[in-house]
Image (cartoon, grey):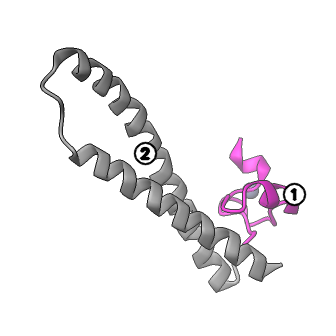
Amino acid sequence: MSEQLDKILIDKKVELTQRITAIEADFKKGRSADFSEQTTESENDEVLDEIHHEAKVELSLVNNAILKLENGQYGICETCDDDINPERLKALPYTSTCIKCAK
Ligand SMILES: [Zn+2]
């Protein structure tokens, strides 16, 4: 089970890292001088910003989970030290809190 988890987490990490790199490359491309295009671009920027932020948050959770897996701390709630429900871990492999503390 833990080998499989390892793979899931590492795959997720690769996916998120690629997504973040792609968004950052997009940001660097520069802005169009055309006003109507600028408007569209700034709306896109907001969406991109949000995706970028979420991906970064997710990536830090994934990294955290990988560390815990290595330390044998995986599956333990960071807040109350209880075991995290296996069903919850299946749905959210990189969660760091149990369902009670997540609320
Ligand atoms: Zn808890």
Task: Assign a secondary structure to mark 2.
Answer: helix
Q: Is residue 40 left or right of residue 99?
A: left
The reply, left or right, for residue 54 in relation to residue 66 is: left
Residue closer to the observer: 48 or 29: 29
Q: Residue at x 17, y 29 (%)?
A: 32
| Image quarter of residue 90 | bottom right
Can you give x and y, in whole percent of width and height, for residue 3 in the image?
75, 82
Q: Amino acid at mark 2?
A: His
Q: Quadrant of residue 43?
A: top left
Q: Is residue 64 above or below residue 95?
A: below
Position of residue 1 relative to residue 36, above or below, is below
| Disc 1, SS | helix
Pick the residue in front: 27 or 6. Answer: 27
Rendered view: 63 above or below 46: below
| Residue linked to disc 1 | 87
On residue 53, the disc is 2
Question: What residue appears at the point 81 percent right and 55 percent down from the top-left corner?
Answer: 88
Q: Position of residue 2 (x, y in %)?
A: 78, 80
Q: Main secondary structure of the magenta part?
A: loop
The magenta span reads 74-103
* Badge 2: residue crowd in 10 Å (few <14, some 14–19, many ≥20): few
**Membership of 79 in magenta stretch:** yes
Q: Residue at x 27, y 18 (%)?
A: 39
Q: Within the displayed image, which quadrant is ligand 1 positioned in?
A: bottom right
- Residue 90 is covered by the magenta coloring: yes
Q: Earlier in the sequence, mark 1 or mark 2?
A: 2
Q: Is residue 16 left or right of residue 85?
A: left
Residue placed most toward the observer, 58 or 79: 58
